[in-house]
Structure formats: C-alpha cells, structure tokens
Amino acid sequence: MSIEFTATVLGSARIGPNRELKKAVESYWAGTLDAAALESVARTLRENTWRELVAAGLDSVPVNTFSYYDHVLDTAVMLGALPERVQGIGSELDRYFAAARGNETVAPLEMTKWFDTNYHYLVPEISPATTFSLHPEKVLAELEEARALDVPARPVVVGPVTFLLLSKAVGGSAPLLDRLDEILPLYAELLTTLADAGAEWVQIDEPALVADRTQSEIDCAKRAYDFLSAVSTRPAILLASYFGDLGAALPVLASTGIEGLSIDLTVPGTVEHVAVVPALASKHIVAGVVDGRNIWRTDLDRALATLASLMGSAGTLAVSSSCSLLHVPYTLDGETDIVDPLRSWLAFGAEKVAEVTVLARALRDGTESVSSELDQARAALESRRTDPRLHDAAIRARLEAGVSVDRTPAEERRRAQAVRLDLPSLPTTTIGSYPQTTQIRLARAALRTGQIDETEYVSRMQSEIADVVALQEKIGLDVLVHGEPERNDMVQYFAEQLSGFAATSNGWVQSYGSRCVRPPILYGDVSRPKPMTVNWSEYAQSLTGKPVKGMLTGPVTILAWSFVRDDRPLAESAAQIALAIRDETIDLEEAGIRIVQVDEPALRELLPLRSKDTAAYLEWAVRSFKISTSGVSDDTQIHTHLCYSEFGEIIDAIVDLDADVTSIEAARSHMEVLDDLNSVGFDLGVGPGVYDIHSPRVPSVDEITESLRAALKAVPAERLWVNPDCGLKTRGAAEVERSLRNMVQAAAALR
Ligand SMILES: Nc1nc2c(c(=O)[nH]1)N[C@@H](CNc1ccc(C(=O)N[C@@H](CCC(=O)N[C@@H](CCC(=O)N[C@@H](CCC(=O)O)C(=O)O)C(=O)O)C(=O)O)cc1)CN2
Ligand SMILES: [Zn+2]
C-alpha cells in the first residue's frame, strides 16, 4: 500500500510571482527570446515553486501543474488530440502556441471559462478522424525534474471523463463520452509509466463530476475508475474533485478501487455527504478545508471541527486547499498598501500553504502545538466581524426603500433613440477598449511611482483618447468609444474607485495564456464616492459629433472578477454595486452621453454548477443589471456586451436584461447564438461579433461579409449591429486599424 501524505495543495500558480512566465512567453512570441531561454525560465519557476512548497512543510507536492499556456491544451497534447490544421507545424512549441492563439493561417481552438472561475481553457476539438495516442513526455519530464530535487512529487493530470466532457465534438462526432474506451488504455499506460518513473501517487482531476451529470455520464466515470484502478502497475490514485459537491457521483467513485478522493469542503453540504458513504472508510480523504479560490484567512477552529467530523468516515485524512492555488495570488508579501486590519483577514497562496501545514500539525501533534497560530486566526476573524466598513446604513436604507427597474417598452424606446441618434442601417462600432500600448501602461506606472503627477497623467490619457477618436472617424465607424486607455482593467478600475473594495499591487492571477488580472477584494458595503468615468467620456464626446458610448462594467462582472465577501450573500453585494453603476449612468446622461454600454461578460460565468441553484442566481443577476440601467430616459440607448461563453443556458436571461443593443461573442462559435436568441423571441438590437479579437489575424473583407451574411439570415438588418467579438485592448495598433477598416468596408458594401 502507498504511503499516505498529510499536507498538500491540489495545484499551484505557474505564471510566476512577478509574472516571469508571462514576460518570457510574450518575448518568445515577439521573437526576442529563444526556446531554450524560455524553457530555462520555466524550469526555474517550477523549481522555486516546489522548493517553497517543500520548505513550507507539504509532504506531497503537485507536479505537471506547470503550463506554457493551459493545462487542458496540455492534456490534448498528451492524448495526441491537437486538431489536424496545426499538425503541419514543425516545432512542437510553435504547434502548441498555434493551437492556443492561431497565426496568420491557422485559427486557434475556442477558449471558454474553466467552470465558474475567471480562468479560461482551450476547448479541444475531437473529430471522427481524431486518433488518440499517448505523449507523456511533459508529465514525465516534470516528475523527473522534481524527483531529482528530492521533491515528494505527485503528478497531476486532467481525468478522462472531464477531458471528454470539456471537449467539443467537431465534424459530426457522436457524444464524446463514446470515445472513453479509446482513451482509457492511454491513461492506463500513463499510470504504468508514472509508476515506473517513481510516482507513488497520481492526482487525476475530475471537476466535471461536481456539475449536474446524467446517469450515463456517472456510469462512464464508474467504468473509467474501475478500469484504471485495475491497472496492475500504477501509483495510488487520488481522484480530485473541486468547485462543488460530487452528489450522486460520490458513492459511485467511492465504490471503485481508487485509493484517495479530494473533497471541496468549502462547499456547503459536502461534509455531511462524506459521512453517509461507508466505502470512504477505506480511502485516503484529502480534505479541502482551505479555500483555494478566495483570499480570506481560514477560520482554523472551524476547519479543525470539519476535520474532526471526518475522522470517523475517512480511512486516513490529509489537509489540503479545496482546489488548485492557480486562482489566488502568490503571496501577501509586498502588498504594502494593504494594511491591518484588512491585511490580517487575508491569506494568499503562500499563506494558504502555511494554513494547510498548521492544520496538519494540529492533527498530528494536537491543537496545543499550534495554539499561537489559532489565537492569531481568532483575533483576525473577530476584528473582521466587527469592522464598521462591513455595514453601511445609508446604502442599506436606499436598497430597502426599493429601486424601480421599470423601463418604457422597448419599441417606444427604439423610436425615441432613432430620432436622437440618427444612425445608418448596420451601424458599426467597437466594444470599448483600444490597444493598451506600452506607452499607456508606462504612463500609469509613472503615475504610481510619482514620476509624473495627476495633471500630466490626465493630459497623456486625453491625448490617447483624442487619437482613438480621430482614428475611428478616419475609419468611418458610426458609434465611437473613448478607448478605455485610463483603465488598468475593466473591473479593477471601478473597484479602485468604489468604497468597500481594496486593490492589490502585485496580486496577479492568470486569466488565460499570458494574460493576468489582479482581482480586487470586496470586503465591505459598496458605495460610489464620486463619478468614475464621466470626465473621460465627456472629453471624448467633445471631440466629435458622432455619438460616443459611455462604457461601464456591470455588477455581476465586477463581482465575478473580484474576490468576494463570504460573510454576506452575493446578491446583496450585486445590488449595492448596481446602485453605484446606476448613479454613473445618470451622470453620463446628464453630461450629454447618448449611449451607455454596461458590460456583463461574466453573466454566464457565475451561473451555478448545479441547475437547482440557477433560477435564484439569474433572478438577482438580471435584477442587478436592471437596477444599473433603468435610471436613464427612453432616448438614452443602453448597450450590453457578453463574451467568453456558451450562451445557450442563459438565453432567457439575455432577453430579460432588456438592453436596447447586445453585442455578443459569435466569431469563434459561428453565429449559433443568433438562432438561440431567435428561439426565445429576442427582438432587440444585436451585434454578433464578426471577427475574433483573440488572435492577431486580420480578417479579410470577404470573411467579415460572409459572417454578416450569415447573421442576416437570422436577424433583420434593422436590428443588426456590426462589431468585433470583444474589446481590442490585447491587440496591436496596426492589426486593429486594418481589421476595423475591413469591417467598415464589409458593412458599407452590404448596406
Ligand atoms: N478582470 C478581468 N477579467 C477578464 C477580462 C478582463 O478584461 N478583466 N477579460 C476576459 C479575458 N481575460 C483577460 C484578462 C486580462 C487581460 C489583460 O490584458 N491583462 C493585462 C494586464 C492588465 C493590467 O492590469 N494592466 C495594468 C498593469 C500593466 C503592467 O503590467 N504594467 C507594468 C509596466 C508597463 C509595462 O511593462 O507594460 C508594470 O506595472 O510592471 C495597467 O495597465 O496599469 C496583461 O496580462 O498584460 C485581458 C483579458 C475575461 N476575464
Ligand atoms: Zn468581451
């Protein structure tokens, strides 16, 4: 029997404590760093990560959690399942990056949300022609690298069921789980290879099993783990579940021959469920008591109580984070702007690892051995509970008094807006941001360090805005934007100005590929001390006769991309943020802005993983959008923007938002969304993205025309808007100009 470990985490961040990997990968793409130098940066990051985890006291360390871009893409590579169109690319690394980002000739894989997080994975494409084959080089190399450093390494791979459930069937494939029997032998071979290379444990991630699953899907999971646990030479199997409750899948998995199971104990109900599954008494339970995806300091007493209650149900017990630490920043060290008491309430990655080891020590040596750590945690908790910023009587009174979310019927609004806006048919516009150039970011960095003052910063941003307005007029767009140069990020920018939020200075978390965010921390009640965007929009509008769209981020998205309170319901925070946004829309209108866009790209993301919870979520999500947008007059046009997801499940909610115009990602998913919208009677303005902004490729006029023709089959010209898929902040200036010219030309020709 394998040696049980006592303290671990399910995965770690990989972008680097100072985004070293981001910088190296981007330099490689730019041609200023070669593959060997990139590999050396990666190796150093892995080594540092492992050494820190070992030094902190973990006795089992996840490996193969490194990735140059995405771990689902890595899994596709491991199973020989990259699409045909990249196979011709000679260099392995370039083939990999082409699948991730596309290039001049090859379209990338689709990208979508990793469950309900702000991490995005690449969706593997599986066609009838896909012939799976095992390529274990990456996981083996990381295992060997770690073992050479005496790290107690536990390789981690995405499991077969989750892999197939997250993939997309192309070219008329049957349901992908039908392909399970093709990949199970490869996983079996992998297990033997890992055992031969010295792995005692392997972690197989199956987070897809915490969502609603059909009986036949659960049967597939049973078949998979019966099969894999029957492999004769293999490491002990830790099946990792996280982000939710396994529900009906729990007893089924427990009945297979796996040795270990990780349970996300931050999810209500999971503790109780473990107790009623007798088969767990022979398993190693990896107890996810330290929240791996939020930043609050753990209530150690409560965690110890949870662990104690599991003692009787589990065979053996290890303490762990609830999920990979991919979703939290590296460390609180260096966050000099976050001061006590707030600071004492927090735990980032390194601090969470320390909590895991404290709890494991308590289990092993008794709570007395960690009494000072327990005292500190109690004091922090108490100071948080009693902080006045957590309760703002004025905001609560305003919400309790009730906010009307009624608007005049859409048709009447449409007429009023047509008069005021006087737009051509097939109006062209963009989603808000223009390229965030190094020049813009350096100006912001200079402001931070005091090299330039606020006046100089404002004048530099105004000159960026003037350039973007001039560019749009030159290209001939109909509805202009100011370009968002002043925003470090569409969520952080607002959080920095709202009371109740704190921002980090180095709390980077990977969002996709090399792109990172610093999620703000929502700790208290929210209010808006003063207008947040009005000066910029007003300035842009002063430069042109064409309408400039005001640009705001909606309450659901602000919440989804922040670390949220765990002491109050999300719905309550959403309503508070919504009031702040509502006040901003009214101020924009008063400043002469005729169109206001309230972005909700994360509307789908917060959808609960279990359908029993979705109605309640959609109710408060839609209501908070309507609180935000219903304060303006009929002739002020409200836009919204949605991206990064499959919209099928929230299609009714999109109708309920009642936005005059909805721009929605469609380029990577080929306009399917329009048919979905038609099927529920959507009859407002819609701008299905006509080209994919996530790739540096410039779309041709023909291509865009074809997209628009496809859209016109589903939507009458009077309702159709012409725009890219999403904001342009990640693109280069030259490609943006060429792409938008082609877009405007395609629209003009169709008119
Ligand atoms: N929060 C959030 N989540 C989201 C999205 C989003 O826009 N925001 N979009 C979707 C996709 N995700 C994305 C996430 C990040 C980025 C992105 O562009 N991130 C930037 C960082 C943006 C930022 O915070 N910029 C800061 C800091 C920039 C910086 O690195 N400055 C340098 C100095 C300047 C330089 O060297 O360039 C420094 O401080 O060291 C600023 O502009 O002020 C990046 O990774 O490069 C894009 C899409 C879904 N989730
Ligand atoms: Zn978008």
Image (tube, helix red, strand yellow):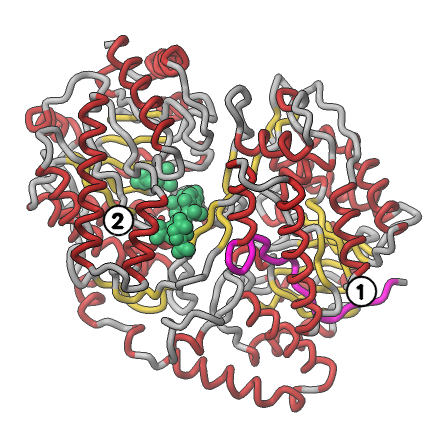
Q: Position of residue 675 (x, y in %)?
A: 40, 21
Q: State the quadrant of the C terminus.
A: top left
Q: Is residue 313 visible?
A: yes
Quick one: label 2 or label 1, which is nearer the N terminus? 1
Q: Is residue 254 visible?
A: no
Whether residue 330 appears in magenta in the rendering, the answer is no
Question: Looking at the picture, which amino acid does disc 2 mark?
Answer: Glu
Q: Position of residue 492 (x, y in %)?
A: 34, 55
Q: Position of residue 566 (x, y in %)?
A: 43, 66
The secondary structure making up most of the magenta span is loop
Q: Residue furthest right?
A: 232
- Distance (Cα) linking label 2 and label 1: 47 Å
Q: Magenta span covers which residues?
A: 2-19
Q: Which mark is residue 486?
A: 2
692 vs 27, nearest the viewer? 27
Q: Decide if residue 125 is on the left or right side of residue 181.
A: left
Please tell me in which quadrant of the rendered image residue 80 appears: top right
Question: Looking at the picture, which amino acid does disc 1 mark?
Answer: Asp
The answer as to whether callout 2 falls within 8 Å of ligand 1 is no
Q: Position of residue 35 (x, y in %)?
A: 64, 40
Q: In the structure shown, which secondary structural element does the residue marked by tag 1 occupy?
A: loop
Image quadrant of ligand 2 equals top left
The answer to whether residue 131 is above or below residue 543 is above
The residue that label 1 is drawn on is 150
Characterize the local packing of mark 2: few (<14), some (14-19) or many (20 or more) Cα atoms within 10 angstroms.
many
